[in-house]
Amino acid sequence: MIEKIEVPEEVKEKTVKINIESGDVGSFKVLEVKNVSKSYDGKTILKNVNLNLVRNDRVAITGKNGVGKTTLLKIIVGIEKPDSGYVYIGPSIELRYFPQDEFVLNSEDVLLEIMLKEGLEVSEARSYLAEFGFENEEVLKKVSELSGGEKRRLLIAKLNLVSSNFLVLDEPTNHLDIETTEALIEALKNYKGTILLVSHDRYLIKSIAHKTYTLEDATLLDHESKPKSEKKLIDTQKQKEVNKIKARIQYLEKLLKDTPNKKKEEELKILKKKLERMK
């Protein structure tokens, strides 16, 4: 079990600079989701879901995998249509969507060309990509050659180029190394707009969200109204994760006393940071 503990991908030590541009103030009423329902193959994913956001709200949605969180976001941004109900976006709202999957990226596109299409000159594009860890000949890679973490960094780089006043983020810290995660969280803290995010990352939610909902049984529930038994279950799951990380740290410290290993030392460093974030 100790050997199977997942660790974020290792990247070269480099300071990542993220500054998400905030657009005009925009409408006070940002979003209204009214009685939205959605079914697939006879299975109800969303049932009469309601959600309202006003200017500068920062809302997180949590829930188990596969319950419909991503579907809800896709309906909100207009990628999918609800079976019933409607979604209203304020008239002067500039929405930017950060998807969980990379369907917005063409697998055959070259990184440098993507930045050139965004209006950057070659030298600007190279310097800009370098800020996100893509240096020298790496800028000539195709999207299909990137790892999961690299694709996420590329999406952040694209997000970084266009101003907005409403961010819709689906698991934005998935596959990111700790340095990039911290830089993203700091950028979101400084962002002067409305944020709606779906995430399992407790540290991200605690750092960014003012209010949290849980999607469960096709219904959006106020997190604070959840029964004590369920809150206790969440605390138990968190403690199990903490115990696994502590066990792995002890294992690595014992191993490294006898056999120095650069890769294991980096893993130990990452796990200690992760443990600190969970406190």
Image: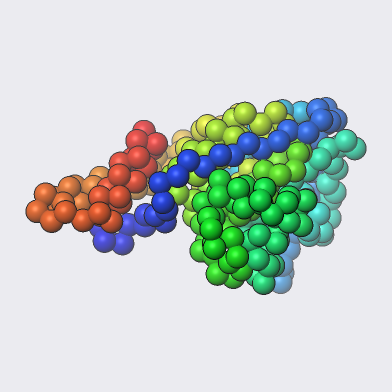
Residue 116 visible from this viewpoint: yes
Q: How is the image coloured?
A: rainbow
Give 125 or 258, whichever is nearer the viewer.
Answer: 125
Which residue sits furthest front?
Answer: 123
Question: Going 73% across and 51% down the picture, which residue do you hit?
Answer: 121
Residue 245 visible from this viewpoint: no
Against 151, residue 58 (above or below) is: above
- Which quadrant would the C terminus be assigned to in this image? top left
Q: Quadrant of residue 37?
A: bottom right
Which residue sits furthest left?
Answer: 258
Give the number of marks. Answer: 0
> Residue 163 appears at what percent x and percent y?
76, 39
Question: Going 58% across and 66% down the picture, which residue do you hit?
Answer: 141
Give 81 or 222, whichever is nearer the viewer.
Answer: 81
Question: Going 78% across and 33% down the picture, which residue do you hit?
Answer: 23
Q: Quadrant of residue 162?
A: top right
> Residue 267 appears at what percent x and percent y?
30, 51
Question: Going 70% across and 28% down the picture, which residue do you hit?
Answer: 192
- Which quadrant would the N terminus be assigned to in this image? bottom left
Give 221 or 266, whichever is nearer the viewer.
Answer: 266
Compared across the picture, whether 20 is left or right of 62 comes to right
Compared across the picture, whether 200 is left or right of 121 comes to left
Compared across the picture, whether 250 is left or right of 143 comes to left
> Residue 199 appears at what percent x and percent y?
56, 46
Compared across the picture, whether 111 is left or right of 95 comes to left
Which residue sits furthest right?
Answer: 91
